[in-house]
Image (cartoon, rainbow, N blue to C red):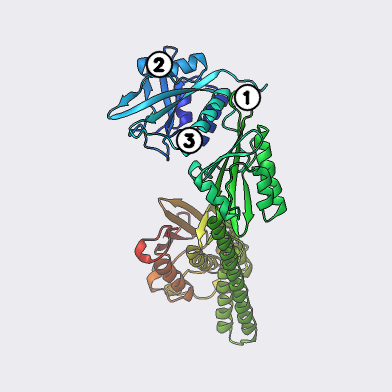
């Protein structure tokens, strides 16, 4: 289905500013649809012969729709849209005519011209027409609520024709709440309540006001009710601003443990201020959940911070123990454990500064790669480079993957470019991992380098760690390798990450480790989707 902008740009000569205004109407017209108990269709002229194209549609939540089928993209002309032509050419709201039938559904047509005000603040030319079509199959004597809804809808319809509705949206403000059904209060020009819906009355009772709202000065009431004087002043000023014809931002009022969201809209049909419309919504439970989530997030971040500190303590203890060990093999094993613990601590450090259980993994890889070149026992200066981006990864993947990359990077540096005295010794058996290469064996025209590449494709993360060192021996078998590092890598890749790994000779020499890790876990894994 094409968007409003696509349809308008393809079939009409409307200016970008005109299309932006139509977008603002479509973003705020659920209010008018609910107050009107009617479907709203946004029609734009296609040709001078009276043909119109429907570019947007909204159905009411307060009444049955007049259209079972979506009308967006429909082009019509002739007698069927004569009412649209009158509203467009004469720049007035059309309400004449007998009911029409859509299949078995009787409906009443209305047409509202859409204007965009000029830079001088005057009503410009008509750029589109809003069709207001009401399903009459459930017509009955309207209640007081319905009469107030319809009266307010007529005022807003006139403001669309004047170019004063919808009001400008404030930066960062959404249009999701409150809605008509949440609670509606209508004010006269003096700010006194002339009507309050039952839901609005209930919302004010939550704030501690038990009397009827009709006749109350709403701005003064907000000042009295608010627990915080500053909140009460801001909410009161919002009401006064709407009575002056302005469109204030949404405000919240807190009182007696309850929270109410308010939105004040000016009512200015034909440019004459006649009062204001105030929509209210009880959001007490929403704010309570928000506070609980904030507390939970803070607790989780604190846990990650403490885990990071504990891991660093463990690493420090292992480091101290390594200094006291006289056996070289034991010292090397302890130092390797220190690096493994430190790599896990990096993930928890990042999570302690994040608001969710996900991390930007590129920074972690860069830090692990830098550490690998600093601690690796080699006399060759090995460069590290990352190509592509890992993006954001969930913690359950990041923790295991950082250990895998730490092992692969250390293997690539230490066994691909070892110290010269080690390279002069007998070749390392295939079962131990990668074959070392002396600095003299490295092509002087090629700078020793390890490249980490990453890209995502079809919910899979593809990673390669490539070096330009000596490479693997012909009889190398990763499955039969006995080195602890390779055993950790295989266990994490096939177990925790549910992925695959392949160690092979690089295309231009050296060694390449290729990983494929699924980013989405199946339901039977008992894990959340990445």
Crowding at mark 3 (Cα within 10 Å: few <14, some 14-19, many 20+): many
Q: Earlier in the sequence, mark 1 or mark 3?
A: 3
Residue 300, position in %: x, y?
56, 67
Instruction: Read off the residue under disc 2.
Output: 82
At which x and y percent is residue 252?
Answer: 62, 49
Q: For the point 62% across and 30% down, which residue is it? A: 274
Q: Earlier in the sequence, mark 2 or mark 3?
A: 3
User: Hey, which quadrant is residue 213 in on the image?
Assistant: top right
Few, some or many residues within 10 Å of mark 1 (<14, 14–19, 20+): few
Of residue 211 and residue 345, the one placed in the foreground of this image is 211
Disc ID at residue 271: 1
Q: Is residue 291 left or right of residue 48?
A: right
Label 3 sits on a secondary structure element that is: helix
- Judged from this view, the residue extending furthest toward the top is 49
Q: Which residue is mark 3?
A: 35
Residue occupying the point 58% across, 23% down: 162
Spatial separation of the CA atoms under disc 1 and disc 2:
28 Å
234 relative to 288, above or below: above
Say whether residue 282 is visible. no
The answer to which of 134 and 301 lies nearer the viewer is 134
What is the spatial separation of the Cα atoms under label 1 and label 3, in whole angstroms? 20 Å
Q: Position of residue 243 (x, y in %)?
A: 66, 35
Asked if residue 94 shows in the view, the reply is yes
| Image quadrant in which you'd find residue 356 | bottom right
Query: SS class of the residue under badge 1?
Result: helix
Q: Is residue 5 shown left or right of residue 376?
A: left
Q: Quadrant of the N terminus?
A: top left
Closer to the camera: disc 1 or disc 2? 1
In what quadrant of the picture does the C terminus appear? Answer: bottom left
Is tag 1's residue or tag 2's residue first in the polypeptide sequence? 2
Q: Residue at x 62, y 59 (%)?
A: 256
């Amino acid at each position: 289905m094409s968007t409003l902008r696509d349809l308008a740009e393809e079939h009409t000569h409307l200016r970008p500013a005109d299309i932006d205004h139509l977008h603002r109407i479509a973003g705020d017209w659920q209010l008018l649809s609910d107050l009107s108990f009617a479907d709203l269709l946004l029609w734009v002229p296609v040709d001078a012969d009276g043909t119109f194209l429907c570019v947007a549609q909204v159905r009411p939540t307060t009444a049955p729709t007049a259209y079972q089928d979506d009308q967006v993209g429909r082009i019509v002309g002739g007698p069927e849209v004569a009412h649209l032509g009158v509203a467009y050419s004469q720049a007035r709201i059309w309400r004449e005519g007998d009911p029409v039938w859509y299949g078995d559904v009787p409906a009443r047509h209305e047409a509202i011209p859409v204007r965009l005000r000029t830079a001088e603040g005057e009503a410009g030319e008509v750029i589109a027409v809003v069709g207001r079509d009401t399903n009459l199959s459930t017509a009955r004597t309207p209640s007081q609520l319905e009469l107030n809804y319809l009266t307010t809808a007529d005022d807003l319809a006139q403001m669309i024709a004047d170019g004063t509705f919808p009001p400008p949206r404030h930066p960062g403000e959404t249009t999701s709440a409150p809605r008509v059904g949440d609670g509606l209060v209508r004010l006269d020009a003096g700010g006194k309540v002339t009507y309050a819906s039952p839901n609005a009355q209930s919302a004010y009772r939550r704030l501690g006001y038990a009397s009827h709202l009709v006749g109350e000065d709403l701005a003064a009431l907000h000042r009295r009710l608010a627990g915080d004087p500053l909140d009460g002043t801001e909410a009161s000023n919002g009401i006064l601003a709407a009575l002056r014809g302005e469109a204030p931002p949404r405000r919240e009022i807190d009182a007696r443990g309850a929270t109410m969201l308010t939105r004040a809209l000016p009512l200015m049909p034909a440019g004459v201020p006649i009062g204001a419309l105030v929509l209210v919504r009880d959001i007490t439970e929403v704010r309570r959940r928000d506070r609980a989530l904030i507390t939970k997030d803070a607790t989780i971040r604190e846990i990650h911070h403490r885990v990071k500190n504990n891991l660093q303590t463990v690493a420090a203890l292992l480091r101290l123990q390594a200094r006291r060990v006289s056996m070289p093999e034991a010292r090397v094993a302890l130092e390797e454990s220190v690096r493994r613990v430190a790599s896990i601590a990096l993930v928890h450090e990042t999570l302690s500064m994040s608001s969710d259980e996900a991390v930007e993994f590129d920074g972690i890889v860069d830090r692990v790669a830098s550490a690998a070149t600093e601690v690796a026992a080699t006399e060759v200066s090995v460069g590290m480079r990352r190509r592509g981006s890992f993006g954001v990864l969930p913690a359950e993947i990041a923790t295991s993957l950082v250990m895998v990359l730490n092992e692969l990077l250390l293997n690539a540096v230490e066994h691909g470019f070892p110290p010269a005295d080690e390279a002069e010794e007998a070749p390392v058996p295939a079962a131990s991992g990668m074959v070392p290469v002396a600095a003299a064996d490295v092509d002087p025209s090629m700078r020793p380098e390890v490249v980490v590449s990453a890209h995502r494709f079809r919910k899979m993360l593809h990673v390669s760690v490539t070096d330009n060192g000596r490479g693997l021996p012909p009889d190398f078998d990763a499955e039969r390798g006995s080195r602890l590092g390779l055993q950790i890598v295989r266990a994490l890749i096939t177990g925790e990450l549910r992925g695959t790994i392949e160690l092979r000779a690089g295309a231009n020499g050296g060694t390449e480790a290729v990983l494929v890790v699924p980013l989405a876990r199946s339901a039977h894994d008992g894990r959340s989707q990445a």
